[in-house]
Amino acid sequence: MTDQPADPAQPSGPSPEVLAELDRLDAACQAAPGDIDAQIRLWQAVASLEQWVFINRGTAEQPRPYALAAEAGQMLCLYSSAERARAAAIANGLVQAGEPVPLFQIPLPAAIDWALALGERGVAGVTVDYPQLGAWSPLPNLARLRQDRAPGPAA
C-alpha cells in the first residue's frame, strides 16, 4: 500500500479505452439491474485495474478514504483514476473547483485486502467512480475478486 498522494502533474491511471469499458459495463448493469453476470463483469474489470485511487479525508500520514453513509453501513468510494477522483471531490462538494484534491492510491491486489480489512471499522461495501458510475458491491464480494486475482497453481 502506498499512502502517498497521487501526483496531479503525472499521468495516472488506466487508458481511456479501459475507462470507456468501465463506463460501458456500468451502463449494462444500469440497463439490466437484475443481471448478475453483468455486475460480475464490471467488478472483474474494476479488480483488474493496476491501482485504486481514493480521496483522502485524513492526513498524508494517516490517510482516511472518503466514504458514504448507507443504510447497510459505510460505502467506501474507490476511483479508477485520479481524474475521476478529482471530479468526484468537486461534484460532492469536498473541495472547490481549482483547489488541490488530496488523493492516495493503492495497487491491486493489495487494495482489495485493505478494503476488506476496513470491514472491521464499519465499511459494508464499495462503490466505484461515485457519482459518475452507479455501481456498488457488498464488501464480502471483494473476497471473491481477490481470489480471482491470486496467481494460479504452477503448471
Image (cartoon, helix red, strand yellow):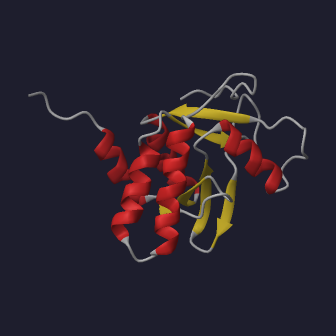
Residue at position x 59%, y 67% in the image: 73
Residue 5, percent from left and from top: 70, 28
Q: In the picture shown, does residue 101 fall above or below 132? A: above
**Residue 108 as seen in the image, left or right of residue 88:** left
Residue 75, percent from left and from top: 60, 60
**Residue 68 as seen in the image, left or right of residue 15:** right
**Residue 130 visible:** yes
Q: Nearer the viewer, residue 15 or 94?
A: 15
Residue at position x 69%, y 44% in the image: 85
User: Quarter holding the C terminus?
Assistant: top left
Residue at position x 49%, y 47% in the image: 117
**Residue 64 visible:** no
- Identify the residue at the far top of this view: 10
Quarter-wise, where is residue 131 in the image? bottom right
Residue 9, percent from left and from top: 75, 22
**Residue 3 as seen in the image, left or right of residue 60:** left
Quarter-wise, where is residue 103 in the image? top right
Q: Nearer the viewer, residue 85 or 94?
A: 85
**Residue 22 as seen in the image, left or right of residue 148:** right
Residue 10, percent from left and from top: 69, 22
- Identify the residue at the far left of this view: 155
Q: Nearer the viewer, residue 64 or 106?
A: 106
Q: In the picture shown, does residue 93 fall above or below 11? A: below
What count of labels does the image hold?
A: 0
Quarter-wise, where is residue 101 in the image? top right
